[in-house]
Amino acid sequence: MRPSGSSTLVPVTYLGRNVYVIDNGGLGYDRTNATFVVRTSRGSIMIDTGYAVAFRRVMEGLRAIGIGRDELKAVLLTHVHLDHCGATPLILREFRDAVVVVHPRGARHLEDPSRLLEATKEIFGERVFSKMGGMEPVDGSRIVRVSDEEELEFGDVVLRALYTPGHAPHHVAYLLTPHRYVFAGDALATRGTVFKVPLPDTVPPGFDFEAGMRSIRRVFEADPRLVLITHYGWYVASQELMEEELELYRRWFERIRELKSQGLDRFRIAELFIREFEDGLRQPLHPVARDWIYRYVWGAYLGIG
Protein backbone atom coordinates (compact mmCIF):
# COMPACT_ATOMS: atom_id res chain seq x y z
CA MET A 1 0.00 0.00 0.00
CA ARG A 2 1.21 3.51 -0.82
CA PRO A 3 0.16 6.60 1.16
CA SER A 4 -1.16 9.62 -0.66
CA GLY A 5 1.54 12.16 -1.50
CA SER A 6 4.45 9.83 -0.74
CA SER A 7 6.85 7.94 -2.96
CA THR A 8 7.74 5.56 -0.13
CA LEU A 9 6.35 2.08 -0.43
CA VAL A 10 4.88 1.43 3.00
CA PRO A 11 4.81 -2.27 3.90
CA VAL A 12 1.23 -2.72 5.07
CA THR A 13 -0.54 -6.09 4.90
CA TYR A 14 -4.32 -6.40 5.11
CA LEU A 15 -5.35 -9.59 6.90
CA GLY A 16 -9.06 -9.10 6.32
CA ARG A 17 -11.78 -8.23 8.84
CA ASN A 18 -10.31 -4.73 9.30
CA VAL A 19 -6.99 -5.97 10.69
CA TYR A 20 -3.73 -4.59 9.29
CA VAL A 21 -0.02 -5.24 9.83
CA ILE A 22 2.45 -2.37 9.47
CA ASP A 23 6.04 -3.53 9.02
CA ASN A 24 7.61 -0.78 11.12
CA GLY A 25 11.15 -1.75 10.15
CA GLY A 26 12.57 -2.26 13.64
CA LEU A 27 16.14 -0.97 13.59
CA GLY A 28 16.36 -0.87 9.82
CA TYR A 29 15.39 -4.39 8.78
CA ASP A 30 12.09 -5.33 7.15
CA ARG A 31 9.96 -8.16 8.57
CA THR A 32 11.50 -8.02 12.02
CA ASN A 33 9.03 -5.83 13.94
CA ALA A 34 5.27 -5.42 13.46
CA THR A 35 2.68 -2.87 14.51
CA PHE A 36 -0.91 -4.10 14.30
CA VAL A 37 -3.98 -1.96 13.61
CA VAL A 38 -7.65 -2.87 14.02
CA ARG A 39 -10.39 -0.62 12.63
CA THR A 40 -13.65 -0.81 14.55
CA SER A 41 -17.05 0.86 14.48
CA ARG A 42 -15.75 3.23 17.19
CA GLY A 43 -12.35 4.19 15.84
CA SER A 44 -9.08 2.34 15.43
CA ILE A 45 -6.76 0.49 17.81
CA MET A 46 -3.00 0.01 17.55
CA ILE A 47 -1.16 -2.89 19.16
CA ASP A 48 2.53 -2.12 19.84
CA THR A 49 4.18 0.96 18.34
CA GLY A 50 7.74 -0.15 17.65
CA TYR A 51 10.83 1.87 18.49
CA ALA A 52 10.70 5.67 18.54
CA VAL A 53 12.89 5.61 15.44
CA ALA A 54 10.08 3.72 13.63
CA PHE A 55 7.55 6.50 14.26
CA ARG A 56 7.65 8.02 10.76
CA ARG A 57 7.23 4.63 9.13
CA VAL A 58 4.28 3.80 11.40
CA MET A 59 2.67 7.13 10.55
CA GLU A 60 3.10 6.42 6.84
CA GLY A 61 1.46 3.06 7.40
CA LEU A 62 -1.47 4.68 9.19
CA ARG A 63 -1.90 7.14 6.33
CA ALA A 64 -1.79 4.26 3.85
CA ILE A 65 -4.58 2.56 5.76
CA GLY A 66 -6.51 5.84 5.77
CA ILE A 67 -6.55 6.61 9.49
CA GLY A 68 -7.17 10.28 10.27
CA ARG A 69 -6.02 12.33 13.26
CA ASP A 70 -9.28 11.77 15.17
CA GLU A 71 -9.66 8.04 14.46
CA LEU A 72 -7.04 6.32 16.62
CA LYS A 73 -8.57 5.72 20.06
CA ALA A 74 -6.13 3.43 21.85
CA VAL A 75 -2.61 2.04 21.78
CA LEU A 76 -2.48 -1.39 23.42
CA LEU A 77 0.97 -2.45 24.57
CA THR A 78 1.83 -6.10 25.06
CA HIS A 79 4.71 -4.96 27.27
CA VAL A 80 7.08 -2.09 27.92
CA HIS A 81 10.23 -2.88 25.97
CA LEU A 82 11.40 -0.21 23.52
CA ASP A 83 10.81 -2.34 20.42
CA HIS A 84 7.14 -2.46 21.42
CA CYS A 85 6.51 0.86 23.16
CA GLY A 86 9.23 3.36 22.19
CA ALA A 87 7.07 5.40 19.80
CA THR A 88 4.10 5.58 22.21
CA PRO A 89 4.62 9.22 23.34
CA LEU A 90 5.03 10.33 19.71
CA ILE A 91 1.86 8.50 18.66
CA LEU A 92 -0.11 10.03 21.55
CA ARG A 93 1.13 13.48 20.56
CA GLU A 94 -0.26 12.99 17.05
CA PHE A 95 -3.55 11.41 18.15
CA ARG A 96 -4.94 13.54 20.96
CA ASP A 97 -7.98 11.30 21.57
CA ALA A 98 -5.91 8.15 22.10
CA VAL A 99 -5.00 6.48 25.39
CA VAL A 100 -2.36 3.82 26.02
CA VAL A 101 -3.38 0.51 27.60
CA VAL A 102 -0.81 -1.49 29.57
CA HIS A 103 -0.50 -3.92 32.48
CA PRO A 104 -0.23 -2.10 35.86
CA ARG A 105 3.36 -3.32 36.37
CA GLY A 106 4.39 -1.69 33.09
CA ALA A 107 2.58 1.62 33.62
CA ARG A 108 5.24 3.12 35.89
CA HIS A 109 7.88 2.66 33.18
CA LEU A 110 5.77 4.69 30.76
CA GLU A 111 5.42 7.59 33.21
CA ASP A 112 9.11 7.45 34.10
CA PRO A 113 11.12 5.48 31.52
CA SER A 114 14.52 6.22 33.08
CA ARG A 115 15.04 2.69 34.46
CA LEU A 116 13.81 1.16 31.21
CA LEU A 117 16.25 3.27 29.20
CA GLU A 118 19.12 2.47 31.55
CA ALA A 119 18.48 -1.27 31.39
CA THR A 120 18.11 -1.22 27.61
CA LYS A 121 21.42 0.60 27.18
CA GLU A 122 23.13 -1.90 29.48
CA ILE A 123 21.76 -4.89 27.53
CA PHE A 124 22.22 -3.61 23.98
CA GLY A 125 25.22 -1.31 24.39
CA GLU A 126 25.51 2.38 23.54
CA ARG A 127 25.87 1.88 19.77
CA VAL A 128 22.62 -0.09 19.29
CA PHE A 129 20.76 1.87 21.96
CA SER A 130 21.52 5.14 20.17
CA LYS A 131 19.68 3.84 17.08
CA MET A 132 16.43 3.19 18.97
CA GLY A 133 15.43 6.81 19.47
CA GLY A 134 14.96 6.63 23.23
CA MET A 135 11.57 7.27 24.79
CA GLU A 136 9.89 10.27 26.39
CA PRO A 137 7.64 10.03 29.47
CA VAL A 138 3.91 9.45 28.94
CA ASP A 139 1.36 11.67 30.67
CA GLY A 140 -0.18 9.53 33.43
CA SER A 141 -3.67 10.81 32.63
CA ARG A 142 -3.52 8.99 29.30
CA ILE A 143 -2.52 5.61 30.73
CA VAL A 144 -5.19 2.93 31.20
CA ARG A 145 -4.17 -0.06 33.32
CA VAL A 146 -5.54 -3.42 32.23
CA SER A 147 -5.66 -6.58 34.35
CA ASP A 148 -5.93 -10.24 33.46
CA GLU A 149 -9.25 -11.20 31.82
CA GLU A 150 -10.36 -7.56 31.63
CA GLU A 151 -12.34 -6.81 28.48
CA LEU A 152 -12.02 -3.63 26.43
CA GLU A 153 -14.97 -2.88 24.18
CA PHE A 154 -14.49 -0.89 20.99
CA GLY A 155 -17.80 -0.82 19.15
CA ASP A 156 -18.16 -4.08 17.24
CA VAL A 157 -15.07 -5.76 18.74
CA VAL A 158 -13.86 -6.72 22.20
CA LEU A 159 -10.25 -7.24 23.29
CA ARG A 160 -9.65 -9.44 26.31
CA ALA A 161 -6.38 -9.10 28.20
CA LEU A 162 -4.47 -12.32 28.85
CA TYR A 163 -1.73 -11.96 31.44
CA THR A 164 1.22 -13.81 29.89
CA PRO A 165 4.43 -13.26 31.90
CA GLY A 166 7.75 -14.95 31.18
CA HIS A 167 9.29 -12.70 28.56
CA ALA A 168 8.47 -9.81 30.90
CA PRO A 169 6.65 -9.81 34.27
CA HIS A 170 4.09 -7.34 32.89
CA HIS A 171 3.45 -9.01 29.52
CA VAL A 172 -0.13 -9.10 28.22
CA ALA A 173 -1.56 -10.71 25.08
CA TYR A 174 -4.90 -9.56 23.67
CA LEU A 175 -7.67 -11.78 22.29
CA LEU A 176 -9.69 -9.97 19.62
CA THR A 177 -13.29 -11.15 19.32
CA PRO A 178 -15.33 -12.09 17.38
CA HIS A 179 -12.28 -12.65 15.12
CA ARG A 180 -10.51 -14.95 17.62
CA TYR A 181 -7.14 -13.40 16.81
CA VAL A 182 -4.52 -13.24 19.57
CA PHE A 183 -1.94 -10.46 19.52
CA ALA A 184 0.72 -12.45 21.36
CA GLY A 185 3.56 -9.91 21.54
CA ASP A 186 6.65 -11.83 22.64
CA ALA A 187 4.86 -14.65 24.47
CA LEU A 188 5.68 -16.93 21.53
CA ALA A 189 8.87 -17.60 19.59
CA THR A 190 10.41 -15.24 17.05
CA ARG A 191 9.61 -16.48 13.55
CA GLY A 192 9.54 -15.41 9.91
CA THR A 193 11.52 -15.30 6.71
CA VAL A 194 14.31 -13.16 8.18
CA PHE A 195 15.00 -15.62 10.98
CA LYS A 196 14.80 -18.90 8.99
CA VAL A 197 14.36 -20.89 12.21
CA PRO A 198 12.00 -20.20 15.15
CA LEU A 199 13.89 -18.73 18.11
CA PRO A 200 12.66 -18.67 21.72
CA ASP A 201 12.29 -15.00 22.68
CA THR A 202 14.19 -15.21 25.97
CA VAL A 203 15.74 -11.77 26.37
CA PRO A 204 17.67 -10.47 29.39
CA PRO A 205 17.53 -9.58 32.23
CA GLY A 206 16.25 -13.11 32.77
CA PHE A 207 13.45 -15.09 31.17
CA ASP A 208 11.09 -16.87 33.61
CA PHE A 209 10.88 -20.35 32.09
CA GLU A 210 7.97 -21.74 34.12
CA ALA A 211 5.88 -18.59 33.66
CA GLY A 212 6.74 -18.54 29.96
CA MET A 213 5.58 -22.13 29.47
CA ARG A 214 2.29 -21.37 31.24
CA SER A 215 1.86 -18.30 29.02
CA ILE A 216 2.31 -20.31 25.82
CA ARG A 217 -0.48 -22.61 26.98
CA ARG A 218 -2.59 -19.61 27.98
CA VAL A 219 -2.38 -18.13 24.48
CA PHE A 220 -3.62 -21.33 22.86
CA GLU A 221 -6.20 -22.13 25.55
CA ALA A 222 -7.94 -18.89 24.53
CA ASP A 223 -8.92 -20.86 21.39
CA PRO A 224 -7.60 -18.42 18.77
CA ARG A 225 -7.92 -18.91 15.03
CA LEU A 226 -4.80 -16.84 14.36
CA VAL A 227 -1.81 -15.81 16.46
CA LEU A 228 -0.05 -12.55 15.56
CA ILE A 229 3.48 -12.01 16.85
CA THR A 230 5.49 -8.83 16.80
CA HIS A 231 8.65 -10.62 15.60
CA TYR A 232 7.22 -11.45 13.07
CA GLY A 233 4.01 -12.41 11.34
CA TRP A 234 0.70 -14.22 11.69
CA TYR A 235 0.15 -17.95 11.98
CA VAL A 236 -2.84 -20.30 12.05
CA ALA A 237 -3.31 -21.49 15.63
CA SER A 238 -3.34 -25.22 16.22
CA GLN A 239 -2.58 -27.87 18.81
CA GLU A 240 0.50 -28.74 16.76
CA LEU A 241 1.80 -25.16 16.90
CA MET A 242 1.32 -25.03 20.68
CA GLU A 243 3.22 -28.29 21.12
CA GLU A 244 5.97 -27.05 18.81
CA GLU A 245 6.32 -23.86 20.88
CA LEU A 246 6.45 -25.75 24.18
CA GLU A 247 9.03 -28.22 22.87
CA LEU A 248 11.10 -25.42 21.35
CA TYR A 249 11.36 -23.57 24.67
CA ARG A 250 11.92 -26.79 26.62
CA ARG A 251 14.80 -27.90 24.38
CA TRP A 252 16.31 -24.40 24.38
CA PHE A 253 16.49 -24.26 28.17
CA GLU A 254 17.61 -27.86 28.61
CA ARG A 255 20.46 -27.36 26.14
CA ILE A 256 21.60 -24.07 27.65
CA ARG A 257 21.41 -25.55 31.16
CA GLU A 258 23.51 -28.53 30.05
CA LEU A 259 26.14 -26.40 28.30
CA LYS A 260 26.29 -23.95 31.21
CA SER A 261 26.90 -26.85 33.61
CA GLN A 262 29.84 -27.87 31.38
CA GLY A 263 31.41 -24.46 31.94
CA LEU A 264 30.51 -22.72 28.67
CA ASP A 265 29.74 -19.03 28.97
CA ARG A 266 26.83 -17.40 27.12
CA PHE A 267 28.99 -16.22 24.24
CA ARG A 268 30.33 -19.68 23.48
CA ILE A 269 26.84 -21.17 23.72
CA ALA A 270 25.45 -18.58 21.30
CA GLU A 271 28.31 -19.19 18.87
CA LEU A 272 27.67 -22.93 19.04
CA PHE A 273 23.95 -22.44 18.34
CA ILE A 274 24.65 -20.13 15.41
CA ARG A 275 27.07 -22.63 13.90
CA GLU A 276 24.56 -25.47 14.32
CA PHE A 277 21.74 -23.46 12.75
CA GLU A 278 23.90 -22.42 9.81
CA ASP A 279 25.14 -25.97 9.28
CA GLY A 280 21.55 -27.21 9.25
CA LEU A 281 20.38 -24.48 6.86
CA ARG A 282 23.54 -24.66 4.74
CA GLN A 283 23.54 -20.88 4.56
CA PRO A 284 24.45 -17.95 6.83
CA LEU A 285 21.84 -16.58 9.19
CA HIS A 286 20.57 -13.04 8.71
CA PRO A 287 22.61 -10.54 10.81
CA VAL A 288 19.50 -9.79 12.89
CA ALA A 289 19.00 -13.48 13.66
CA ARG A 290 22.65 -13.88 14.69
CA ASP A 291 22.46 -10.81 16.92
CA TRP A 292 19.22 -11.88 18.55
CA ILE A 293 20.50 -15.39 19.26
CA TYR A 294 23.23 -13.84 21.43
CA ARG A 295 20.60 -11.93 23.43
CA TYR A 296 18.12 -14.81 23.64
CA VAL A 297 20.85 -17.13 24.94
CA TRP A 298 21.84 -14.46 27.46
CA GLY A 299 18.30 -14.17 28.84
CA ALA A 300 17.91 -17.93 29.20
CA TYR A 301 21.42 -18.19 30.69
CA LEU A 302 20.52 -15.66 33.38
CA GLY A 303 17.08 -17.21 33.90
CA ILE A 304 18.65 -20.57 34.69
CA GLY A 305 20.57 -18.95 37.56
Image (spheres, helix red, strand yellow):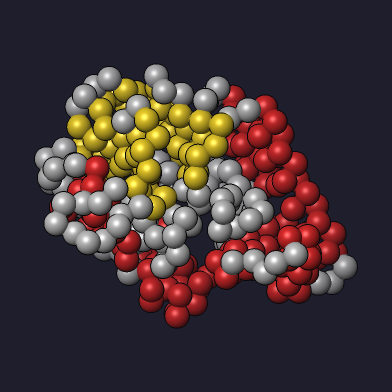
Residue at 67 percent of width and 40 percent of height: 245
Residue at 64 percent of width and 66 percent of height: 285
Closer to the camera, 90 or 142? 90
Closer to the camera, 140 or 55? 55
Q: Is residue 168 left or right of residue 36?
A: right
Residue 110 pos. (x, y %): 32, 54
Quadrant of residue 111 in the image?
bottom left
Q: Is residue 207 left or right of residue 248?
A: left
Quadrant of residue 148 in the image?
top left
Residue 18 pos. (x, y %): 31, 30
Residue at 23 percent of width and 47 percent of height: 64
Q: Is residue 259 left or right of residue 165?
A: right
Residue 109 seen = no
Residue that protrudes farthest toward the bottom in the picture: 127
Closer to the camera, 178 or 64? 64
Q: Is residue 37 left or right of residue 238?
A: left
Residue 232 seen = yes
Residue 232 pos. (x, y %): 50, 49
Residue 113 pos. (x, y %): 34, 61
Quadrant of residue 149 in the image?
top left
Closer to the camera, 177 or 281? 281
Residue at 26 percent of width and 32 percent of height: 39
Figure check: 100 above or below 201: above
Figure check: 198 above or below 270: above
Quadrant position of the C terminus in the picture: bottom right
| Image mark count | 0
Residue that protrudes farthest toward the right in the picture: 262
